[in-house]
Amino acid sequence: DTAVSQTPKYLVTQMGNDKSIKCEQNLGHDTMYWYKQDSKKFLKIMFSYNNKELIINETVPNRFSPKSPDKAHLNLHINSLELGDSAVYFCASSPLGTRATEQYFGPGTRLTVT
Amino acid sequence: GEDVEQSLFLSVREGDSSVINCTYTDSSSTYLYWYKQEPGAGLQLLTYIFSNMDMKQDQRLTVLLNKKDKHLSLRIADTQTGDSAIYFCAERQGSGNTGKLIFGQGTTLQVKP
């Protein structure tokens, strides 16, 4: 009964490759996010989608392309991977509305680019 | 990260109180949050406070908000070894579906037995 799940948990790949990370939430939430956490634990938002529509696109290289096939899924595809892409990527979801809009995080995907 | 700042490390003894501090810059933030991250895990929402409140208590957790100074603190009473983790302060910028969380760099709490 995992709320927000991500696959894979670990991903090791070489520079120049293309890879995808998948995220699914079973909470019925309307909004989903991708965050990047670097080696210093600094956590920064990358994208958010609301009901399959891109809402937030922070200053992220266009090698990163999120795709939301339905509101329960938000996948992250990364082209031409670089060493600096090594990080932990977290997916999150939140309900829409005027309440606190707390976000529920997945367990993270640790990406290592060699 | 530049909008929200926290000290990086705090060490306390088991049974003591822990106080983790945070400063933020956006005075229009409506909600402020505390998240906990255990090693190898995702972030878990601990508590949040609405900007028109000064204090919120939830069992061992007390959140204090000084809106004038843009200062937020999290007090953990009777700290246990299981509380060892990284604690992130976050402010919510924007509203509705364009709202986003801006996180501090996290405070590592070490609890010594």
Image (cartoon, coloured by chain):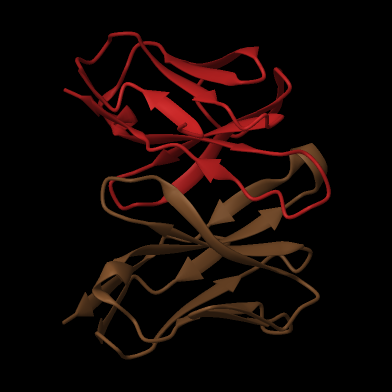
Residue ID at (38%, 38%):
A107
Query: Is residue B24 among the parts visible in the rendering?
Result: yes
Q: Is residue B86 left or right of residue B56?
A: left
| Residue B63 spot, x, y in % from top left | 59, 79
Residue ID at (67%, 29%):
A28
Looking at the image, which is closer to me, A18 or A103?
A: A103
Query: Is residue B1 among the parts visible in the rendering?
Result: no
Residue ID at (56%, 20%):
A74
| Residue A45 spot, x, y in % from top left | 54, 40
Q: Is residue B53 left or right of residue A19?
A: right
> Chain A drawn in what color?
red
Point out the image quarter for the C terminus of chain A: top left
- Residue lying farthest bottom? B16
| Residue A16 spot, x, y in % from top left | 27, 10
Looking at the image, which is closer to me, B85 or A82?
A: B85
Residue ID at (32%, 55%):
B38
- Relative to B93, is A14 above or below? above
Task: Identify the image quadrant of residue B37.
Answer: bottom left
| Residue B22 spot, x, y in % from top left | 52, 74
Looking at the image, which is closer to me, A37 or A102?
A: A102
- Relative to A103, is A20 above or below? above
- Relative to B63, is A44 above or below? above
- Relative to B41, is A69 above or below? above
> Chain B drawn in what color?
brown
Q: What is the count of numbered marks?
A: 0
Task: Identify the image quadrant of residue A94.
Answer: top right
- Residue lying farthest front? A1
